[in-house]
Amino acid sequence: MLTEMKRRKYTLRQRAAKQDETRARIVAAAMALHEELGPGATTVSAVAGRAGVQRLTVYRHFPDDASLFEACTSHWLSLHPPPVPAQWEGIADADARCRAALADFYSYYRRTAGMWRAAYRDLAQVPALAGPMDRVEAHLAGVRDDLVAAWKPAPADRQALEATTALALRFTTWDELQRLGLDTDAMAALAARWMACIGGG
């Protein structure tokens, strides 16, 4: 009796491990295709083919687009976490703090440009992207608030400074500046100057 129970437990553990491995393969396949083709052009058939499973297996693990995008986004961000205020919280000077933060973000965007470019391009046509991208926007808003607070702006300047800082932090701003040939340090210096024009009084 005990031997049979142990055998069943072992079989269940094996099955669970196999399911986890299959799920991980599906997520990795979808993540790669989202970057290569874009979320809008990635089909369940393509994901299944890349993962080496049947379409039904993909649906068994992820019954809809939203669940697959959530899993992909969580995994991708765990591999490529965006900068956080803790990285520059020790810098008291507002201008230096902004330059450090922007340099961190622009370096990050340079390393991860393929995925961000595909995500922003396809956002309007892929409803399932809305949830994950809303969380990205919330993170950027938190960073914006941290940088704006460092300037201690006058009430009359706060809205303009918030808008300028939000613009400076966006991937699309980095993408346009790199197309114009600026390197990371030059971008950070330029964008920090925008902010200093308002926040520096």
Image (tube, helix red, strand yellow):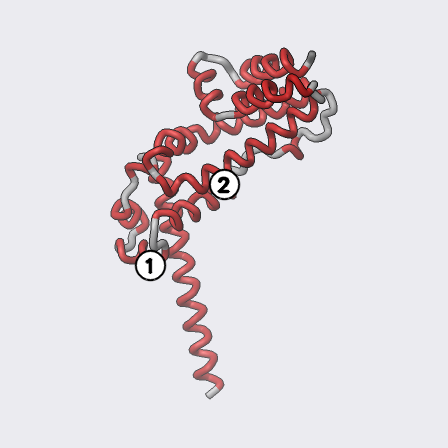
**Which amino acid is tagged 1?**
Arg
Q: Point out residue 61 in the picture as x, y percentages from the top left corner.
A: 36, 57
What residue sits 30% from the left and 57% below the top? 57
Residue with the mark numbered 2: 77
Vertical position of residue 3 compared to residue 62: above or below: below
Task: Locate residue 90, reporting x and y percent.
Answer: 73, 29
* Label annotation for residue 80: none
Q: Residue at x 65, y 29 (%)?
A: 146
Characterize the local packing of mark 2: few (<14), some (14-19) or many (20 or more) Cα atoms within 10 angstroms. few
Quarter occupied by residue 85: top right
Drawn side of residue 73 relative to residue 64, left or right: right
Q: Is residue 199 left or right of residue 25?
A: right
Q: Residue drawn at (59%, 18%), measured in percent from left and top?
A: 160
Q: Amino acid at mark 2?
A: Leu
- The crowding category of the residue bearing disc 1, from other C-alpha atoms within 10 Å (few below 14, some 14 to 19, many at least 20), is few
Residue placed under numbered mark 1 in the picture: 60
Residue 75 relative to residue 105: left or right: left
Which comes sooner in the sequence, label 1 or label 2?
1
